[in-house]
Amino acid sequence: MRITAAQRTANENRIRAAMDRLLRGEIPPDGRCDVKTLATEAGVDRTAFYGDRPYAHLREEFEARLHTLQQQGTVPDPRLAQITRLKAENTALRERLTERDETIAELAAFRTEALSRLAAQHDEITRLRTTGPTAANVKRLPTRNTQIGPC
């Protein structure tokens, strides 16, 4: 079915109005900033935007304007902006988690080494107490009483 020039002009005007709304960020619920939503908002069949169909030039214009906005750092679709923000946040959290895991591993290794050194020092002190004084000027210290009560 052929459309008249007036119908085509009216369709193009509806498409341009829908294009402006989408690019301003007025995205309908369950929609995105894409050609499918553009066609739905304008009340035009989506296939008219592809190939050598009558509104292919409007699809190219829409995609070019969308690309320009994205290069300027403006994202008309709030969901895409949210997805981008959440991906960046997820990456940052993963990096923090990796750093924390490394810190925990380092602290666990330090703790193991410190306990090992304390045990070795305790063993050396115990060994030295049992060997007794060998020099005349070394006094043996009394051992600690392990009973509970006054000393």
Image: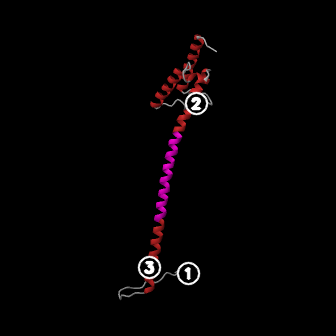
Q: Secondary structure at mark 1?
A: loop
Whether residue 89 is in magenta: the answer is yes
Q: CA distance from mark 1 to mark 3?
A: 21 Å
Q: Are marks 1 and 2 in contact (CB under 8 Å)?
A: no
Q: Amino acid at mark 1?
A: Gln
Q: Are marks 2 and 3 in contact (CB under 8 Å)?
A: no
Q: Which residues are magenta?
A: 85-110
Q: Secondary structure at mark 3?
A: helix
Q: Which residue is mark 3?
A: 125
Q: Residue at x 56, y 34 (%)?
A: 79
Q: Which residue is mark 1?
A: 147
**Number of dots carrying numbers:** 3
Q: Picture coordinates of residue 124 (x, y %)?
A: 44, 79
Q: Picture coordinates of residue 59 (x, y %)?
A: 53, 23
The answer to whether residue 81 is seen in the rendering is yes
Closer to the camera in the image, 148 or 3: 3
Q: Secondary structure at mark 2?
A: loop
Q: Amino acid at mark 3?
A: Ile
Q: Residue at x 49, y 63 (%)?
A: 108
Q: CA distance from mark 2 to mark 3?
A: 75 Å
Q: CA distance from mark 1 to mark 2?
A: 79 Å
What secondary structure is the magenta-colored segment mainly? helix
Q: Which mark is residue 32?
A: 2
Local crowd size for mark 3, using a 10 Å CA cut-off: few (<14), some (14–19), many (≥20): few
Q: Amino acid at mark 2?
A: Arg
